[in-house]
């Protein structure tokens, strides 16, 4: 199921349950349970979107403050759409459900990433930045968002 971006954007007041213009991760999580329950279960995608969207603090401070301001909310929704799509791709490759993709799973699902030519092992190793022998969701995101 895809995210209804317009519905999320028009629901800022539901997200901001402590009407202070700043959304905590807990507020976002709680609102998503009611507004987009199919997305609310995709915690890694939510966390990735949250971190990517927290660009500045109150009064325009130039560093992240751990909250999503009203100004950052549209970017959060955009990031949530993007990272939820990536998370669903990741889950599709993670056949054993251990929240990481081994080489066998990668080899079976790499065509979905558009990787049909070349060396599967070299592609896997390029994505597996920490060399742990598994592709983690953060590594998967970093690879897919670099283009």
Image: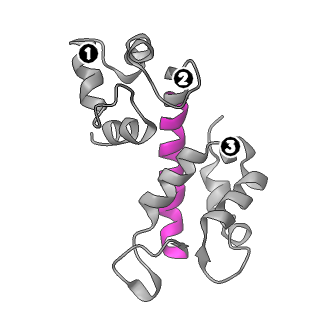
According to the image, label 1 marks what residue? 121
Instruction: Tell me the number on the disc at residue 54.
Output: none
Residue at 52% in and 23% down: 94
Q: Does 77 lie within the magenta span?
A: yes
**Percent coordinates x, y for residue 123 in the rendering:** 26, 22
Task: Work out whether residue 77 can be spotted.
Answer: yes
According to the image, label 2 marks what residue? 92
**Percent coordinates x, y for residue 10 in the rendering:** 66, 64
Q: Quadrant of the C terminus?
A: top left
Q: In which quarter of the image is the N terminus?
A: top right
Mark whose residue sits in front, 1 or 2: 1
**Percent coordinates x, y for residue 49 in the rendering:** 49, 54
Residues marked 1 and 3 touching at CB (< 8 Å): no
**Percent coordinates x, y for residue 86 in the rendering:** 47, 36
Instruction: Tell me the number on the disc at residue 41.
Output: 3
Disc 3 is placed on an element classified as loop
Task: Work out whether residue 10 can be spotted.
Answer: no
Q: In this view, does 147 lie above or below 127?
A: below
């Amino acid at each position: 199921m895809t995210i209804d971006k317009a519905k999320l954007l028009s629901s800022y007041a539901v997200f901001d349950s402590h009407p202070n213009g700043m959304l905590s991760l807990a507020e976002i999580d709680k609102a998503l349970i009611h507004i987009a329950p199919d997305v609310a279960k995709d915690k890694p995608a939510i966390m990735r979107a949250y971190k990517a969207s927290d660009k500045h603090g109150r009064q325009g401070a130039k560093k992240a403050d751990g909250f999503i301001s009203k100004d950052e909310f549209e970017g959060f929704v955009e990031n949530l759409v993007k990272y939820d799509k990536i998370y669903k791709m990741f889950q599709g490759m993670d056949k054993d459900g251990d929240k990481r993709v081994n080489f066998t799973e990668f080899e079976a699902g790499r065509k979905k990433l558009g990787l049909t030519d070349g060396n599967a092992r070299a592609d896997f190793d390029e994505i597996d930045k920490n060399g742990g022998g598994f592709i983690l969701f953060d590594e998967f995101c970093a690879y897919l968002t670099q283009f």
